[in-house]
Image: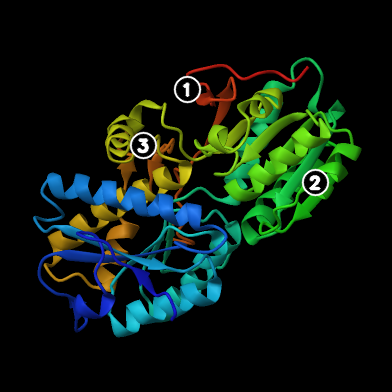
Amino acid sequence: MRLRHCLYAGLVLAASTFLVGETWAADPLRVPMITPLTGSIAVLGQDSKKAAEVAQETINAAGGIGGRPLQLEIVDTQGRPEIARREMERLTREGRAPVVLACDISAGTSGAAQFAESAQVPLLNGSAVSADILARGYKWYFSHQISSDDEAATAYAYMQTITGAKPLADRRIALLYEDSPRGAGTGERLRKLMDAQGVKVVSEITYNRADRNLLPVMRKVQDSAPELVVWIGYTEDVVAGLKAARQLDFKPFVLGIGGGLGDPRLPELVDPAIIDQLHVANVDYFNPDIKRTTAFREAYMKRFGTDPSSYAGTCYGAIMTLKAALEAALKTSPDLTSISVRDALRNLDIPGNDTVTPFRFIRFDPANGRNLGAEELVAAWVGGKRKETVFPAGIAVGKPVMLP
């Protein structure tokens, strides 16, 4: 039986029961959210689901949206473009949903965005970073998240910060990334940026994120003798790679990009000693030690007993952005339509301090839907057991470890 969506009390209802005609019916406001609950990247979806629970509880405790309670329908895409596109068709054609939230990987979000454009229904992206989607110039796609261009720029700026007296052009740097649009997109952009600045890449190695034996991959990286490895990956493949590095006694500095090397569960999944030995830092879009995350972090910790991951943080932030858009749309008409929600998203201007992310503000570019205020941070592991923000200086709570 095909898994279409996951139901759980107080949060999720079947799409066929909640929408009538071209506009949303009366209370409550029911919003579809696509995310990979199963499959190789299910950790992203499960964390996003947790964030949705906290967001819904927080919003409803404060009076809901326009006085109406929020309910989120969680739809499983498995991270696969064909499923994401199929579910978008179901939600928008059968269910008449006037907006869909995506907390999915870039591959799944790409498929959803393509259909959203043809159906003329706004899709708010909370997790995917692929700049290729933005390059298509969609008018119904709004990306709350940073892009792969932002990731590459932040990684390069941080590398310049930690190089010390020895110029970056004289360092031996390797690139390692999984071969999906997300990993390859950021990896290729970083390499081009380094090439333009005369910074040598001693090896550039890709792998499939479903591969759990990364020993041959890590051996290839080790053979290039890098001082620093810039590694773009998800949690499962990062764990496999860290174990392989330990087996090989391979100890370069490691700069991660994305949720994998920043996952707060990492010290439970690998020996914290290897995280510490590699001086792991991570370019990320969320870290729970910055001040603006306090309320969300406490609510998440109370409910789940652990710090929220980057996946949870960015999805929660997108839900709160959608809340602001829905409130603005309801002021123009009690009936939410795809056009009223799209116009509200286009006109949003949210100050950075009103988000849980390190963004300067939230405002969407009318040309491609990019969040013009999106920025990233770098969090470094301390003792292999906890992360602290070390870059940029304006929000840092600690200092980075310099390359020798």
Which residue sits at x=44%, y=43%?
A: 373
Tag 1 secondary structure: loop
The picture places residue 145, in percent across and down from the top left corner, at 46, 50
Which residue sits at x=80%, y=43%?
A: 218
Relative placement, left or right, of 380 versus 197 is: left
The picture places residue 135, in percent across and down from the top left corner, at 58, 63
Q: Are marks 3 and 1 in contact (CB under 8 Å)?
A: no
Mark 2: amino acid: Leu
Q: Dot 3, crowdedness within 10 Å: few (<14), some or many (≥20)?
A: some
Residue 105 vs 177, above or below: the answer is below
The earlier-in-sequence mark between 3 and 1 is: 3
Closer mark to the observer between disc 1 and disc 2: 2
- Label 1 to label 2, Cα distance in Å? 39 Å
Residue 113 vs 402, above or below: the answer is below
Q: Dot 2, crowdedness within 10 Å: few (<14), some or many (≥20)?
A: some
Quadrant of the rendering where the N terminus is positioned: bottom left
Tag 3 secondary structure: helix
The residue indicated by pointer 2 is: 215
The residue indicated by pointer 1 is: 394
Q: Nearer the viewer, residue 54 or 367?
A: 54
Which residue sits at x=50%, y=24%?
A: 388
Mark 3: amino acid: Gly
| Total tally of numbered discs in the picture | 3
The earlier-in-sequence mark between 1 and 2 is: 2
The residue indicated by pointer 3 is: 352
Which residue sits at x=44%, y=35%?
A: 358
The picture places residue 143, in percent across and down from the top left corner, at 45, 56
Closer mark to the observer between disc 3 and disc 2: 2
Mark 1: amino acid: Gly
Q: Dot 1, crowdedness within 10 Å: few (<14), some or many (≥20)?
A: few
Residue 210 figure quarter: bottom right
